[in-house]
Amino acid sequence: MTVRATSRGAQRTSLEGTRAEVLICGASFAGLAAARELAGSGASVLVIDRYEIGERQTSACACPTPWLEALGLADSIKQELPYMSFSTPHGSARYRLPWSWSSFDYRKLCELLWDQCGDARFETAKVESVGNRRADGLVEVMTDRGVILAPLVVDALGWRRVLSSPHYQPPEAPLSRGLEVHPEHDGSGDALDIWIERSIVRRGYGWRVPAADEARIGVGSYDPNEHVKQSTVELAERLDRDAVGYQGNWFPHRLREATEGGIFFAGDSAGHCFPLSGEGIRTAFYFGIACGRELRAVIDGRSDRAAALAAYERFNSAHKRPFAIALALQRLIPALPPRLLTALLSLIGRQAIVDRAFGWYLDQASPQFATPDALHSTAGAVGDARVFAGASR
Ligand SMILES: Cc1cc2nc3c(=O)[nH]c(=O)nc-3n(C[C@H](O)[C@H](O)[C@H](O)COP(=O)(O)OP(=O)(O)OC[C@H]3O[C@@H](n4cnc5c(N)ncnc54)[C@H](O)[C@@H]3O)c2cc1C
């Protein structure tokens, strides 16, 4: 049974009228990455989430190892996976990547990130909506513990984009859906395995992520109308594993605006999950850091809110191309005849092509971005070093 740490009922005191210089809503990948950039700034930073930090895992928790290392999160790694395998009904291909994936422990990772967030304060609260933007510059955020006020507000609350109106709602919104199970595992395996088979899911893929003592086996559908429970159970059965420890969620597959109504959006709330791969942890870190650097520039007096919002939106827009390419591939690949896809996967399997393709992919949100004085590791993706968040001044 899940042990819930989050306080309920009478244990929750009112937060009505609480003020902070920066209010970060959402204490997962994007929110904590943004808060981390504000450590040592002297600003009053309040982070809120409906659950305690690290309490509720929402993904298979596989991330490029260089990102975990760059953020000082290597202690959360459960298993390193230098290979990827892709299977279709007609064959499979195994690639050695120029970098590795690592599966990690969500709670541990969040705790390690939080340790780097300096004097930021944390409260559990369910965010309901955004209220008035007051004449004094304060934004009212409505929560189940009362109204919290701050001039700088970040929505890192995930796919629903809670502080926007209207919210994103499936199945109409451009969202994919994913479900996975977490059976026991013996620590074997060196690959993140992917299945692209229409019998599993018409438009999407199945996965297995070994994570030391558990395997994370799941199915994602690019079509929000297609249910994936049955196919997840069948994939687990095929792999001779029990379908236990369910966990599922929606994830966006289209880049959204990163600012709206004076609010910063980072991670899934801004559509920062890559289409095709459904990889959104690295990008949540990446855009969370970019957002945090803009906030830091305001706190340090190098910028003001309007300029920070504009710079962050420019940074976001500069990534439209890779997101558009990934979305086009997300549409194309499921439509390819399976035999052609199998042949292509084998063709791409030449080491030089794998290195190039996966090197390009990593560069779209490069781990070098995590280093404090990185001025520009993502020129290829961003196209214009001047838009580098928080470093333009
Ligand atoms: C089954 C599945 C497996 C996945 N596997 C991977 C993977 O292996 N690797 C990868 O890179 N990506 C994966 N993804 C995608 C990845 O989970 C997301 O892109 C990523 O979690 C986005 O991070 P985030 O910080 O923006 O949002 P989230 O991780 O969704 O965090 C949002 C936070 O906001 C809080 N919150 C939400 N609403 C409220 C509210 N109203 N009030 C208060 N708090 C609230 C939540 O509790 C949570 O802490 C997977 C997705 C799914 C569904």
Image: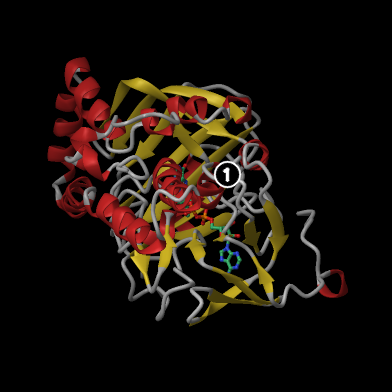
Q: Quadrant of the C terminus?
A: top left
Q: Would you say 150 lies left or right of 282 here?
A: right
Q: Can residue 224 be seen in the rendering of this structure?
A: no
**Residue depicted at x 47% and y 48%:** 292
Q: Residue furthest front?
A: 301
The amino acid pointed to by label 1 is Ser
Q: Nearer the viewer, residue 380 or 393?
A: 393
**Residue depicted at x 58% and y 77%:** 128
Q: Position of residue 330 (x, y in %)?
A: 23, 51
Q: Secondary structure at mark 1?
A: loop
Q: Is residue 160 above or below residue 186?
A: below
Q: Position of residue 389 (x, y in %)?
A: 34, 45
Q: Quadrant of residue 19?
A: bottom right
Q: Nearer the viewer, residue 194 or 241?
A: 194
Which residue was labeled with disc 1? 41
Q: Position of residue 69 (x, y in %)?
A: 51, 24
Q: Can residue 298 be seen in the rendering of this structure?
A: yes
Q: Nearer the viewer, residue 22 or 249?
A: 22
Q: Nearer the viewer, residue 323 or 181?
A: 323
Q: Is residue 357 above or below residue 115?
A: above
Total numbered labels: 1
**Residue depicted at x 30% and y 63%:** 256
Q: Would you say 370 lies left or right of 245 here?
A: left
Q: Is residue 74 above or below residue 3?
A: above
Q: Would you say 40 lies left or right of 166 here?
A: right
